[in-house]
């Protein structure tokens, strides 16, 4: 069989990618009633974000047993989220995971600055994109593995062909039902990094990330809420993160960094609040640094 998955749970990821393509492409050939258009665009945006999460997981732990199938899946993922799959590796895998939100992180929370929550989110995403664009051009940036170097130009070509075809078929609908979900999906993918790391301690083994433990959101977003264990074990498959979080992270993490609802936290801390959640108490971070020195 061509699709030789390492974990059967990744069939859900494949189903999500198929649903995303359906949501993006159906409006080009079928007249969506105006009353449903906004709902359709929002749903498509959410699934584009989900594809971003799937891509993130795939770049940390390739889904298929054969390398060529993983490269092919990179190409499939690219038009579904409006961004090449391989291009997330340098800013995310090589930079963010090395700094955990610290001073050398191109996506560090300080980029958000101060002010109203939504303004801070927009500012953060803009500055993060600028940092990543500049950072990847530096001479000392690690190179991609050869198989990803081979995959990247094909992904770029696939995205360009996809865009040209969409504009040739129905330019206005393509901009509305594909372009907008792409932009929102990418914005969500970048912005979620802020809520996962703001007011955390990048020098702590267990307190460097905020974790969202709600079952529904983690089912839909492929356990992306269990972020501390992901930083501890970035190649661990997403389906194993909840159990690993309970065993390794939960006994040591500061209580305020375990939050049940990601949507509730987003509303409370960013939509109706002009400041981020308070920093961890100094004694808490020092206590965990001491614990790290004992465990490491």
Image (tube, helix red, strand yellow):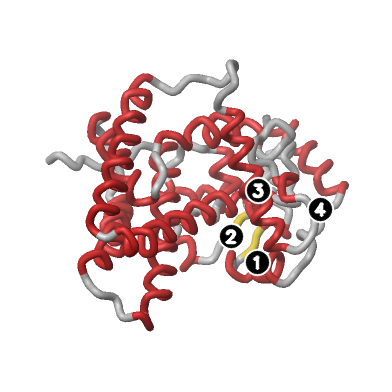
- From the viewer's perspective, is 27 left or right of 46? left
Residue drawn at x 44%, y 37% as measured from the top left: 60
Q: Position of residue 143 (x, y in %)?
A: 48, 20
Please state which of residues 58 and 138 is positioned toward the viewer in this rendering: 138
Q: CA distance from mark 2 to mark 3?
A: 10 Å
Residue, far top: 139
Regarding mark 3 in the picture, which secondary structure is present there? loop
Mark toward the start of the polypeptide (3 vs 1) = 3
- Tell me the residue that label 4 is attached to: 279
* Tags 4 and 1 touching, CB below 8 Å: no
Residue drawn at x 64%, y 65% as measured from the top left: 266
- Tell me the residue that label 3 is attached to: 209
- Tell me the residue that label 2 is attached to: 212
Q: Position of residue 41 (x, y in %)?
A: 40, 68
Give me the disc on residue 72. none
Q: CA distance from mark 4 to mark 1?
A: 15 Å
Give me the disc on residue 265. 1
* Tags 3 and 4 touching, CB below 8 Å: no
* Tags 3 and 1 touching, CB below 8 Å: no
- From the viewer's perspective, is 67 left or right of 175? left
Q: CA distance from mark 3 to mark 4?
A: 12 Å
Q: Which image quadrant for residue 178? A: bottom left
The crowding category of the residue bearing disc 4, from other C-alpha atoms within 10 Å (few below 14, some 14 to 19, many at least 20), is few
Mark toward the start of the polypeptide (3 vs 4) = 3
Please state which of residues 61 and 268 is positioned toward the viewer in this rendering: 268
The crowding category of the residue bearing disc 2, from other C-alpha atoms within 10 Å (few below 14, some 14 to 19, many at least 20), is many
């Amino acid at each position: 069989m061509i699709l030789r998955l390492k974990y059967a749970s990744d069939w859900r990821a494949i189903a999500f990618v198929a649903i995303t393509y359906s949501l993006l492409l159906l409006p080009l050939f079928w007249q969506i009633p105006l009353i449903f258009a906004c709902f359709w665009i929002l749903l498509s945006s959410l699934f584009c974000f989900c594809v971003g999460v799937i891509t993130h997981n795939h770049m940390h732990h390739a889904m298929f047993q054969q390398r060529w199938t993983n490269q092919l899946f990179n190409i499939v993922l690219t038009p579904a989220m409006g961004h090449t799959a391989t291009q997330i590796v340098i800013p995310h895998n090589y930079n963010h995971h090395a700094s955990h939100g610290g001073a050398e992180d191109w996506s560090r929370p300080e980029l958000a600055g101060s002010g109203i929550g939504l303004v801070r989110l927009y500012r953060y995403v803009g500055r993060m994109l600028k940092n990543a664009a500049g950072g990847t051009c530096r001479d000392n940036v690690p190179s991609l593995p050869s198989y990803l170097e081979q995959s990247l130009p094909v992904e770029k070509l696939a995205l360009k062909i996809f865009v040209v075809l969409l504009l040739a078929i129905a330019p206005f609908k393509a901009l509305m039902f594909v372009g907008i979900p792409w932009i929102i999906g990418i914005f969500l993918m970048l912005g979620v990094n802020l809520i996962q790391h703001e007011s955390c301690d990048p020098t702590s083994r267990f307190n460097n990330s905020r974790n969202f433990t709600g079952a529904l959101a983690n089912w839909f977003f492929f356990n992306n809420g269990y972020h501390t264990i992901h930083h501890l074990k970035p190649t661990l498959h997403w389906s194993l993160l909840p159990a690993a979080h309970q065993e390794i992270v939960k006994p040591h993490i500061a209580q305020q960094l375990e939050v049940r609802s990601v949507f509730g936290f987003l509303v409370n801390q960013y939509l109706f609040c002009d400041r981020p959640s308070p920093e961890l108490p100094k004694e808490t971070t020092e206590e965990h640094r001491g614990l790290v020195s004992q465990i490491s």
